[in-house]
Image (spheres, helix red, strand yellow):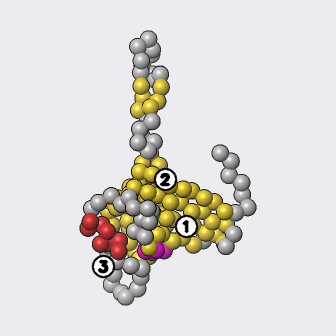
Amino acid sequence: SDGTIKMYGQTLARVKSGNITISNNLTAQRYIGNYDRTITSAQTAGQRTYEISLVLLITDRTIWDELRKQTETTADTALIELEFSKSSTDKIVLKFDNYITTSVDVPFPDDKGAIEVAITASARTLDTCTYTGKWIIQG
């Protein structure tokens, strides 16, 4: 498998590991006439958020500069693009918009090898999600 990340308009690093957490922020609603406290009448969806936590082999210092800006990135060319491929014909591409980098853990390595950086970003919008391969995704 191979994974890359493109943020702030350029490819920054190779993805070593990570996870994406989707929070729907559901709120239980109860109405008059429903007197059973164990049953909710409806669930109201809140603002869906996406938390992206990755361990990267860093290739560019742009991630450090963007963290210091502390602003939400909303430009059209500034999507978080995650691409994971198993082969040339089997890959998934996730693109997130309206995100802010919440933390970056940059260690000081003892040797002159690659730097592994842990990054966490929060996005408000899943722009696109595409899959190319032999499997069929129903939905």
Q: Which mark is residue 108?
A: 3
How many residues crowd around disc 1 within 10 Å: few (fewer than 14), some, or many (20 or more)? many
Who's the residue at 38% across and 72% down the image?
117
**Quarter of the view holding residue 72:** bottom left
Q: Which mark is residue 83?
A: 1
Q: Main secondary structure of the magenta part?
A: strand
For the C terminus, give its image quadrant: top right
**Quarter of the view holding residue 54:** bottom left
Badge 3 amino acid: Phe
For the N terminus, give its image quadrant: bottom right
Q: Give the Cα distance between marks 1 and 2.
A: 14 Å
Circle 2 sits in a helix, a strand or a loop, which is it?
strand
Span of residues in magenta: 11-15
Badge 1 amino acid: Glu
Circle 3 sits in a helix, a strand or a loop, which is it?
loop
Residue on which the image places disc 2: 126
Asked whether residue 51 is in view, the answer is no
Asked whether residue 60 is in view, the answer is yes
Which dot, 1 or 3, sits closer to the camera?
A: 1
How far across and how far down the image is residue 29, in percent?
42, 25
- Labels 1 and 3: the sequence-earlier one: 1
Badge 2 amino acid: Leu
Contact? badges 1 and 2 (CB < 8 Å): no
Q: Give the Cα distance between marks 2 and 3.
A: 33 Å
Who's the residue at 66% across and 72% down the image?
87
